[in-house]
Image (cartoon, helix red, strand yellow):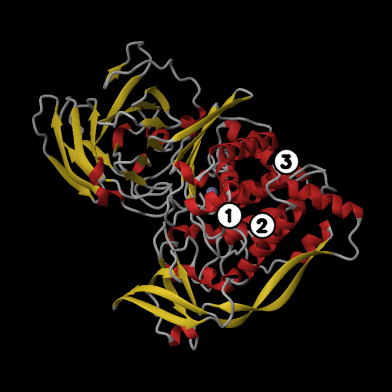
Amino acid sequence: MKRPTSDKPGQMWGTIVFVFVLACSWAALAQTGAPPVTEPQAVGPGPGGGITVQVAYTISLKSAVNHIAHVAIRLRPLAPNRPYRVQLPVWNALYQVRDFAQYARAVAAHDDDGGAVPIRLVDKTTWEADIDSRTVTFEYDVVADNPGPFGAELNDRHAFFNLAEILMYPVDLRDGWMQVTFTDVPPAWKVATSLRQIRTNLLLARNYDELVDAPVELGTFQESVLAQRGAEYRVVVDADPSDYDMSAISRMAYKLAATEVEWMQDWPAGHYLFIYHFPRHPAGGGMEHADSTAIDAPAERVKANPLSLADVTAHEFFHLWNVKRIRPQSLEPVDYTKEQYTRALWFSEGVTSTVADFVRVRAGYLDEKGFLAELAADIRQLESRPARLTQSVEEASLDAWLEKYPAYELPERSISYYNKGEIVGLLLDLQMREVSGGKKSLRDLFHWMNEHYAKQGKFFPDSAGVREAAETVTGADFRDFFARYVSGVDAIPYDKFFATVGLRLQRQTITAADAGFRSVRHLGRPATVISVSPGSEAEKAGLRRGDTIQEVNGRVSEFLPETEISSIRVGDRVDLRIDGAGGQRHIKFKVGARPVENYILVEREDATATQRARRAAWMRGDSE
Ligand SMILES: [Zn+2]
């Protein structure tokens, strides 16, 4: 997953980000051994005798204008005297408890004769019905008004469903075949999903994990399909057609996908779906799934530069392997009822960004100068957070669930496992090259993990599994590296690593525009101020912790307001439109100045031809 921030001028798709990962058991991914798919009955064996659908969902879009989906779940009989229990996940897609039950209304149940079946609420997210050996149908309304790649949104223009937000699962039948039928769909609407599509409005999944690992877009989207070497890529865009260039975006997506398939020397999916939304309001983020991704970006930016989507697209597509198939043991099996803790997000997310950097260089979307500038910006972000010396990147992974709290996001409290994970990935690659005389690299590590875990249907034992892969591939000892930079909080000796590619890190103190406050943003909502610097112009003008910033100089921004302000000249005036305890107000002040540590990667005077050659190979993720 990736969400846009803000800490990195010059790089749109940044750093902090949360995460997610979805329920996908290996069996669900492998898709082998499935009987021939024939049109299934609502409940019972299909006409071809192949698949027995155990759970049939119907989603009515009749109340689209009110953002309400009506859901019916028809369950086949259970063993006698066993109550039917259904649950709505408390989390999915983001590593964040979002309690989807808050959107469910008027939950009821009936039998096939229409007779009401009494139900009771077991806990905040579980309902139970007593009924013996009869088919039962649960029904409820769900408010779907959360736009974005992690959300569920239904309106009169389109629908995008992360199905985990709207579909309860039967506790005892999570592993059965499931079908979803959409009804009351406007005639002009199409349906896009990576699930098996029996008819336009009828989808089939092997189990609940597979079902909710495939978002569904319904509407009048534009699409493009490319068949390439036995694989089918499909790009679907839901946006105003005047806001984007379909051919530029699909060309980019195809090129990045082909580059990654070549880099991995593997193609585990028969087909892959890119879903893009470009709304005309602040938006952003990407969400990976087993055979698809959903990516949001503001129309204004995409119109100005379609290639600004390359970073997030490369990142999400690489999740096809890293996290979806090369998957940490700690994320399996998925528990939808509570937080699922893992120390491996630095690898599953951060190192995914490392590879996305290589891939953008290989595909021609990033040059050496841009690569080094982005790396220097990543280093500046990490070095500007005092918590780098108290929170390891493994601990940041475990603490992902705290990212919704503003206090947690303070630089004294936390680092980003995306940010440090990406840096650690680049340094791990350099170290692997160094100890193997340039023969082995991160690419070999991923090939090894793909062979030994993904293709065997096994999960890797978190950081220990990554270390084992690095050691097996190179024959060297990586205990010290992992103890210092993965489980530990040692200061990173950058120059020791960068010297191997003829580079050094130059630190310089520069005077930069100072907003005088810090803020955080979550899921497309306006920024909330989390701290105001004592004595700053912002404080003198009346800005307070907890204030919400709606606009900076009359503009709604997709970035953090302090990032916007950092591009304003020192001494110029800034006007913030604020929502706070006292209602709406404007705060105006002169932009202050502060010294900041800046970092640049420069070539060493004594760089050798061998080091330069290794640098070129490193940036492309090439073997030497
Ligand atoms: Zn990600």
Amino acid tagged 2: Val
Give the alpha-carbon distance from disc 3 to disc 1, as whole Å. 19 Å
Q: Residue at x 37, y 49 (%)?
A: 147
* Vertical position of residue 24 compared to residue 286: above or below: above
Closest to the observer, 494 or 156:
156
Rendered location of residue 103, percent (x, y): 26, 49
N-term-proximal mark, 2 vs 1: 1
Number of numbered discs on residues: 3
Q: Determine which of the numbered discs, if any, sits on residue 444 in the image.
A: 3
177, above or below 151, in the image: above
Q: Position of residue 122 (x, y in %)?
A: 21, 47
Q: Name the residue tied to disc 2.
A: 424
Name the residue located 35 percent from the left edge and 40 percent from the top edge.
158
Res. 346 mark:
1
Contact flag, marks 2 and 1 (Cβ < 8 Å):
yes
Q: Is mark 3 within 8 Å of ligand 1?
A: no
Q: Secondary structure at mark 2?
A: helix
- Identify residue type, mark 3: Asp
- Residue drawn at point x = 74 percent, y = 42 percent: 473
